[in-house]
């Protein structure tokens, strides 16, 4: 065994004590910095893990986690940096998002992200190191031309597809001679040109039925080959941001069309059926002026009474009728009259169909447990003067509405019954207390929409004996003043024979027929008695001068506004 000599030991000590060169020092410093950096990263991850446990969130370390370009694109870089969050995993069925701090309660970004991608979003708490690591990946994303899901229909395109559309006849041939890419543009263009309110597309056993609702009545305009269904439904879903691969459950979407004259919204609803799906597209003209109160068609004593009631500072005004009877239009017309600079108006709707300047509008969302009742309870803390609730559906919302009407607010709402007099028994069946309902109600209105006779092809109409007998009974039940006016004027009725202006239908546009009663001492006493029936309330209201919808309709038929057939179609 050999031992190092004294010279060797001395040389070794000299080497260790010799000053380091610049390169050696940089290497040592670099190693030290890396070591301290690793320690700091470990501390950040431990802090994030502890904070996640305290916050009730799942913790995840994204070091070495592969993040796809699709996941990065799910959240734009600007929003990711603003909100300190990143999407690190994306699939059609799930998104996973890492957040530096739990989002505030009023920040609904995660909900909106899930709605936009139609998939659940799982949230994890991550460290600052993980956040920065993923944020740097945005710089590696290739530039991709953005894809828009809006239907980009211009006035020029509308003219291209709709310039030679005169009426409903002949539309089927146009649909059969156009590509799937353009068929939706043609469908929307034709619907706008013909003033349709809804487009119905239904998969059937051997074809695709396309129908337009014009002035409240459905008209079949085309039957397309069933072989094109998959392409067609995919096109609709793509444009309305719906999940293309989901066909076993209902979906709701929206399409915005930008026009020179203003924006146009299509509310799209799909429903699974035996042979595919049923699609309904509701056309919402958000830029239109809207119907004013004086244009509703309420006349005479009913107009004077209702106007007086809506000018009161408190109480409840309720309109009734089935879906599509114009209830929301009536409420909006009333709001336009009441919408003044010194008045705070808040609405709760499902959904918000028409946006109004100067009115605070809130939309219920059942998926997030934001119901009419909860929304109404919240808006009363917003110091409103006037509230409009889209619909009273249950006891909870009814009680809150009544309490607000009794505590200094004017409340407008709707309820589903067949007549105005049926509203009170409906409230009672919900469990509303009679001693609260009676003083809260100002007025109740029942309504339907009838088609107007086309002014271009109006002509006198000869009624058969059966129709005359029905009309005679209604006229006989009119109040004395109205009966005298009818007798003096004579019984002459009209209809439209059909012309190009009205697509051969004989009708163009719609007007409301109404029955309106205000609260009287007699009706109040009947309610407080607890046994108020629809028939008894109607009798008392009629004695007080209320016209029924059928009576109002016959008077409008005598005034050349509508036909007798239309009145009987909707009111009897």
Image (tube, rainbow, N blue to C red):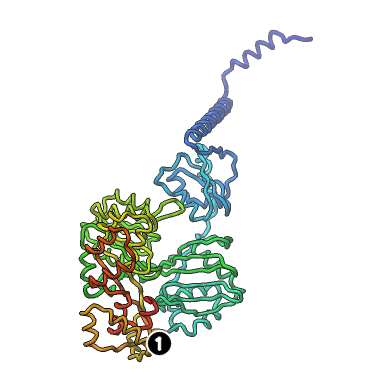
Q: Relative to residue 130, is residue 402 depicted above or below?
A: below
Q: Looking at the image, which is closer to me, 8 or 404?
A: 404
Q: Quadrant of the N terminus?
A: top right
Q: Relative to residue 571, is residue 310 depicted above or below?
A: above
Q: Position of residue 474 (x, y in %)?
A: 31, 80
385 vs 180, left or right, is: left
Is there any visible trace of residue 371 in the rendered image? yes
Q: Position of residue 244 (x, y in %)?
A: 56, 62
Q: Looking at the image, which is closer to me, 276 or 92?
A: 276
Q: Quadrant of the C terminus?
A: bottom left
| SS under mark 1 | helix
Q: Looking at the image, which is closer to me, 525 or 502?
A: 525
What number of labels is visible? 1
Q: Position of residue 9 (x, y in %)?
A: 67, 11
205 vs 167, left or right, is: right
Residue shown at 29% from the left, 58% from the top: 529
Within-10-Å neighbours for mark 1: few <14, some 14–19, many 20+? few
Q: Residue furthest top?
A: 6
Q: Relative to residue 355, is residue 90 depicted above or below?
A: above
Q: Relative to residue 567, is residue 132 depicted above or below?
A: above
| Residue ID for mark 1 | 500
Is there any visible trace of residue 22 in the rendered image? no
Q: Position of residue 293 (x, y in %)?
A: 26, 70
Q: Residue furthest right?
A: 1
Residue shown at 30% from the left, 67% from the top: 536
């Amino acid at each position: 065994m050999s031992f190092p000599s004294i010279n060797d030991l001395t040389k070794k000590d000299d080497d260790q004590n010799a000053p380091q060169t610049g390169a050696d020092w940089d290497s040592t410093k670099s190693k030290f910095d890396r070591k301290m950096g690793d320690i700091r990263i470990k501390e950040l991850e431990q802090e994030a893990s502890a904070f996640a446990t305290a916050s009730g969130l799942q913790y995840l370390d994204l070091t070495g986690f592969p993040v796809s370009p699709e996941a990065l694109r799910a959240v734009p870089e600007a929003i990711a940096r603003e909100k300190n969050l990143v999407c690190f995993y994306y699939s059609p069925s799930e998104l996973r998002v890492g957040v530096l701090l739990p989002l505030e309660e009023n920040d609904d970004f995660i909900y909106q992200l899930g709605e936009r991608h139609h998939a659940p979003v799982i949230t994890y708490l991550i460290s600052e190191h993980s956040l920065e690591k993923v944020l740097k990946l945005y710089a590696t994303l290739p530039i991709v031309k953005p894809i828009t899901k809006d239907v980009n229909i211009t006035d020029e395109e509308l003219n291209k597809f709709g310039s030679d559309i005169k009426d409903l006849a002949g539309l089927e041939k146009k649909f059969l001679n156009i590509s799937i890419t353009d068929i939706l543009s043609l469908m929307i263009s034709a619907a706008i040109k013909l003033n349709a309110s809804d487009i119905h597309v239904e998969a059937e056993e051997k074809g695709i039925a396309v129908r337009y609702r014009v002035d409240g009545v459905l008209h079949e305009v085309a039957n397309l080959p069933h072989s094109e269904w998959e392409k067609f439904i995919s096109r609709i879903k793509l444009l309305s941001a719906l999940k293309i691969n989901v066909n076993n459950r209902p979906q709701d979407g929206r399409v915005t069309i930008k026009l020179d004259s203003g924006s146009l919204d299509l509310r799209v609803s799909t429903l699974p059926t035996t042979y595919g799906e049923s699609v309904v597209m509701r056309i919402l003209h958000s830029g239109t002026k809207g119907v004013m109160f004086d244009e509703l068609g309420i006349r005479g004593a009913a107009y004077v009474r209702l106007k007086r009631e809506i000018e009161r500072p408190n109480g409840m005004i309720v309109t009734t009728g089935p879906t599509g009877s114009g209830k929301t239009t009536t409420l909006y017309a009333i709001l336009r009259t009441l919408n003044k600079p010194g008045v705070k108006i808040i609405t709760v709707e499902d959904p918000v169909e028409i946006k109004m300047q100067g009115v605070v509008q809130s939309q219920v969302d059942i998926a997030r447990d934001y119901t009419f009742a909860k929304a109404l309870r919240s808006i009363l803390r917003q110091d409103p003067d006037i509230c409009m609730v889209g619909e009273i559906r249950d006891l909870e919302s009814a009680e809150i509405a009544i309490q607000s009407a009794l505590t200094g607010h004017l409340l407008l709402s709707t309820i589903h019954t067949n007549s105005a007099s049926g509203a009170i028994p409906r409230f009672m069946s919900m469990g509303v207390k009679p001693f609260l309902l009676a003083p809260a109600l100002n007025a109740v209105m029942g309504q339907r929409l009838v088609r107007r006779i086309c002014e271009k092809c109006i002509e006198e109409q000869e009624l058969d004996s059966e129709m005359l007998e029905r009309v005679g009974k209604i006229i006989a039940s009119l109040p004395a003043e109205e009966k005298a006016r009818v007798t003096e004027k004579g019984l002459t009725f009209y209809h439209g024979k059909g012309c190009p202006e009205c697509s051969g239908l004989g009708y163009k546009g719609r007007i409301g027929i109404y029955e309106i009663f205000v609260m009287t001492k007699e009706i109040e006493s009947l309610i407080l008695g607890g046994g108020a029936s629809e028939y008894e309330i109607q009798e008392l209201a009629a004695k007080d001068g209320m016209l029924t919808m059928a009576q109002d309709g016959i008077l409008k038929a005598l005034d050349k506004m509508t036909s007798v057939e239309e009145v009987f179609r909707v009111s009897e």
